[in-house]
Image (spheres, rainbow, N blue to C red):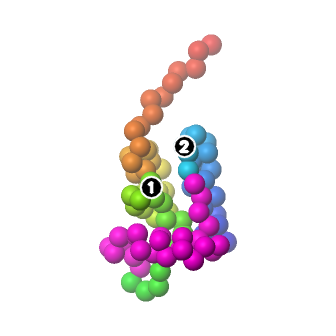
Amino acid sequence: MVIKKKQQDVVRFLEANKIEFEEVDITMSEEQRQWMYKNVPPEKKPTQGNPLPPQIFNGDRYCGDYDSFFESKESNTVFSFLGLKPRLASKAEP
């Protein structure tokens, strides 16, 4: 349940900011699960077991886990975290 809540938080943020993404359900694909395990950097892997979702990638580039995402959201640096150019705030005209 905790994992699902974290995944929904990431998805809601991406949708709200109109950031294109592909959500991958690793429970449905052994190949995708193995790809994720292999592509999380060694220093980011837990001492025991496998990394838990959500793990965030931009293509093949590892961005981080949910805690890193949350920290970047709190510090308003998500675009940098995702490897994207920051968006300029647009003023709404009356």
| Residue 17 is a magenta residue | no
Q: Give the x, y percent position of residue 66.
A: 50, 63
Foreground disc of the pair 2, 1:
1
Taking depth in this image into account, of 63 and 74 the one nearest to the observer is 63
Taking depth in this image into account, of 70 and 48 the one nearest to the observer is 48
Q: Is residue 71 left or right of residue 28?
A: left
Q: Give the x, y percent position of residue 18.
A: 58, 40
Q: Is residue 75 visible?
A: no
| Residue 41 is a magenta residue | yes
> Which image quarter is the C terminus in?
top right
Q: Give the x, y percent position of residue 57.
A: 45, 58
Residue at which label 2 appears: 19
Dot 2: element: loop
For the point 40% across and 51% down, the residue is 81
**Amino acid found under the numbered disc labelled 2:** Ile
Taking depth in this image into account, of 45 and 76 the one nearest to the observer is 45
For the point 54% across and 70% down, the residue is 32
Task: Name the N-terminal-most of marks 2 and 1.
Answer: 2
Dot 1: element: loop
Residue 6: mark in rendering: none
Residue at which label 1 appears: 59
Circle 2: is it few (<14), some (14-19), or many (20+) Cα within 10 Å?
Answer: few
Query: Which region is colored magenta?
Result: 22-46
Q: Is residue 83 left or right of residue 32?
A: left
- Please identify the quarter of the rendering in which residue 41 is found: bottom left
Please say if 68 is above or below 41.
above
Q: Residue furthest right?
A: 1
Please say if 53 is above or below 50.
above
